[in-house]
Image: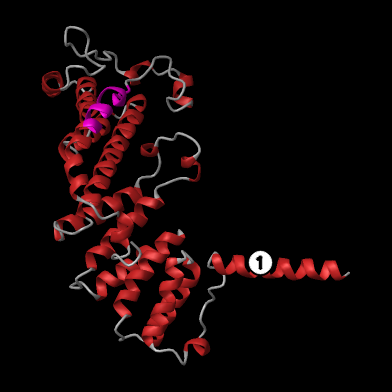
Amino acid sequence: MKNLSLMLLILSLSLTTGCSWLGWGDEEQTEEDSAGLTEKDFYERIQTSLNASNWTVAISNLQLLESQFPFGKYAEQGQLELIYAQYKSGDYESSIASADRFIRLHPQHPNVDYAFYVKGLSEISQTGGFFDSFLPTDSSMRDIGEARGAFTTLTELLSRFPESPYAADARKRLVSLRNRLARAEIHVANYYFPRGAYLAAANRGRFVVENFQQSPAVPDGLAVMAQAYYLLGMKELADNSVEVLVANYPEHPSLDSNGQFDFERRLLADQDSWLDKLSFGVLKRIKPPSFDSRSVYDKVTREAELGEGNQSQQDNKRSIWSLLTFGLLS
């Protein structure tokens, strides 16, 4: 019995020490707990939670800090750290809402660029799926609403604050977002072909060529335009698209060894059987046009972008973690 009591005592002490070491001993402050604390003391306790990555406690206490000291010395800094803590906790919706609120209330704040940056990170994080870490997935085939939002946010960051310490990382993320948005347009264009929506496909291809000019999806955009215009009977526009494709992307899979575009020469809609119509084109007997040259051009584009970014990576000695926490946790 005595040995059992001793073992229970040791286990209890071990758990207490372990919880303290892991930051689990940090508790949410209530209004009564913090009533006797100065703003500075309360803020320093919050920093302990942030340092321990105890995001739930940090979020609760940052909200309490603002309610108790709305015009205090640390009020605005606390709002920025709330954006970050919500982002790190995975509560991206709240992080975006807090960032929007800060931008609206403090548009001239010296660190408002940080609010834009973390908002963009939260929007990017929303685009990921649960299985992305385990299985190879094509992100451009998922809903791109959040990706568009992130692209808009980071574009505004660079437009308003080109010298921001977050600008270099934002530019790299914009490249990835741009490529994803462009590829999504090509996916939609390919979807339109077997359904006979050639004008809609041509418009998608043209949108990529006009708005994502540095994207590796541009050659597919030109190929989409060439094929769609051909099927619409717009030979001059089709020939112009092929001419640009041959001049700039001679290795495109749609071109034969002589540089001739391999048109699908039959109108798919004219070959519909009753089974084709019942299946909405899913069971068509011929393979519809589809363009995806990522195996050819993505690697070339990625290598060029990495080459351009090497110098900026050497110049940027501060880590993203340091920037995110304003150097507090570096």
Pinpoint residue 91: horizontal percent, then vertical percent.
45, 61
Query: In which quadrant will I find the C terminus?
Result: bottom left
For the point 23% across and 52% down, the residue is: 317
Query: In which quadrant will I find the N terminus?
Result: bottom right
Q: Which residue is mark 1?
A: 15
Q: Nearer the viewer, residue 212 or 128?
A: 128
Main secondary structure type of the part rendered in magenta = helix
Judged left or right of residue 111, residue 60 is: right
Judged left or right of residue 97, residue 309 is: left
300 in relation to 160, above or below? above
Residue 185 picture quarter: top left
Q: Residue furthest bottom?
A: 36
31 in relation to 320, above or below? below
For the point 20% across and 31% down, the residue is: 218
Pinpoint residue 23: horizontal percent, then vertical percent.
53, 67
Q: Which residues are magenta?
A: 290-303
Q: Nearer the viewer, residue 260 or 36?
A: 36
Judged left or right of residue 308, residue 148 is: right
Tag 1's secondary structure?
A: helix
